[in-house]
Image (spheres, coloured by chain):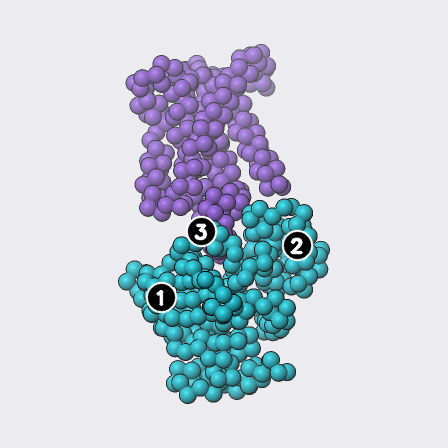
Amino acid sequence: MASPLSPIIEFRDVSFHTAGTQILSGLNLKVDLGETLVLLGRSGSGKTTTLKLVNRLLSPTRGEVRVNGVSNADTDLIRLRRSIGYVIQEVGLFPHFTVERNIGLVPRISGWPEDRVRARVPELLQLVGLAPEFGSRYPHQLSGGQRQRVGVARALAADPEILLMDEPFGALDPITRDELQREFLSLQQKLRKTVVFVTHDLREALRLGSRIALMEAGRLVTVLAPQEFLHSNDPAVAAYVRAFGDGLESAANRGTS
Amino acid sequence: MNVFRFILQNHEQVLELTLEHLWLVGLSTLFATLIGIPLGILIAHRPRLNKPVLAGANIIQTIPSLALFGFLLPLPWLGERADRLAILALTLYALLPIIRNTYTGIRGVDPAVMEAGRGMGLTESQLLLQVELPLALSTILSGVRVAVVISVGLATIAAAIGAGGLGEFIFRGLAMVDNRVILAGAIPAAMLALAADLGVGWIERRLQAQ
């Protein structure tokens, strides 16, 4: 049974390989309700694969992924995906849909009544800091930051419990990224979604994560809170911290500032 | 000019043959579209089928049209009526551009858009109808456009097996060594090709506007 104390996402001894390449091996990981778990690692470390196993864009070769206490292989695929928000770096907005239709898509295909969808869209636009007029625009008329905001709004549209974010701010310029990270934090304070967030940027991980899971070559190295991460003696963690250099304390201290 | 005088004098026959021509081209394009678009969708999703299907359509394209009309002649039911034969042959020729453009159009859809759609829980048919086909539409229609223009030209040869159409004037003119008669077939055929090209372009814009 899924009580509030049980993990909302759980990886049980999960391995994944394609065409002879081992991408993920023996992953055991729990994500708690309402936390932001950051999967941190270099490219090829298996963090995106881990994320895609949650909404079954990929299926594990071994082991199981449980969502809300049930193996996600036993859940109806379409219903599973509609109950999980998904944001990717390339955003993936439908170029032939207006912002309004992009955001309203999941509620509409999930069978919400039209007037409820219509009321929901401006609400979401406001939530991500966009004026209601944006509803009638097309994705190509937006800046990169605005597009990613719409991507987040779209993922939140049907009010999912879980949000999967795959380097959502990776392609943005530093100033816009900073702005969106800040808004993510205040949004998360309001909404308390369970977020799994993939990034290779330690600064971003320290700033946004309630816990950081470091991955390397398909294995989970360790899971630590941001402050612990900075002062860990684990050689892999220490190497990652060293690579990013100075000024990390301030990023990890965002909760107190 | 005496070509135009000839056309005017024979305007009833020109009109009749033009309509026959339109019938051949229209019906064959319709069939080719009904077969070609689903085939194009299929091979875009089943990469293993892509090579054999495109190769098949390519081979058909390389058969000289006169020879193809000849090959089809002994077929039962079809061989009984020349226009059936002509429509089948024209359909086969029109397949390649339609299949290829459908395939290219669908494969050209941004993978990020597909992944986002899939991740959000769109079913495969929703992805096809709401994402892939609308985004591939202009590429698919430009394939149809090419097919129509090719068909208008090829359909003139259908007259060689007695299927009618504007080719009748052309063959008659060749036999009579009379350029006026040839042009009485060629000019309306060229105009038909232009009109068809514009027509499909217009349909494309209408669909795009939606």
Q: Residues within 10 Å of mark 1 (few under 14, many from 20)?
A: many
**From what the image shows, is residue B175 above or below residue A243?**
above
Q: Residue at x 58, y 35 (%)?
A: B203
Kindly identify which numbered label has been placed on residue A76.
3
**From what the image shows, is residue A240 above or below residue A168?**
below
Q: What residue does disc 2 label?
A: A120
Q: Nearer the viewer, mark 3 or mark 2?
A: 3
Badge 2 element: helix
The residues bearing labels 3 and 1 have C-alpha atoms spaced at a distance of 20 Å
Relative placement, left or right, of B123 versus A138 is left
Chain at tag 3: A
The residues bearing labels 1 and 2 have C-alpha atoms spaced at a distance of 37 Å
**From what the image shows, is residue A155 above or below residue B134?**
below
For marks 1 and 2 on the same chain, the one whose residue lies earlier in the sequence: 1
Residue B121 on image: x %, y %: 50, 52
Q: Which kind of residue does numbered mark 3 sit on?
A: Asp
Q: CB atoms at circles 1 and 2 under 8 Å apart?
A: no
Chain at tag 2: A
Badge 3 element: loop
Residue B126 on image: x %, y %: 50, 45
Kindly identify which numbered label has been placed on residue A224.
none
Q: Which kind of residue does numbered mark 1 sit on?
A: Val
Q: Residue at x 37, y 34 (%)?
A: B61
**From what the image shows, is residue B96 above or below residue A39?**
above
Q: Colour of chain B?
A: purple
Badge 1 element: strand
Residue B29 on image: x %, y %: 47, 29
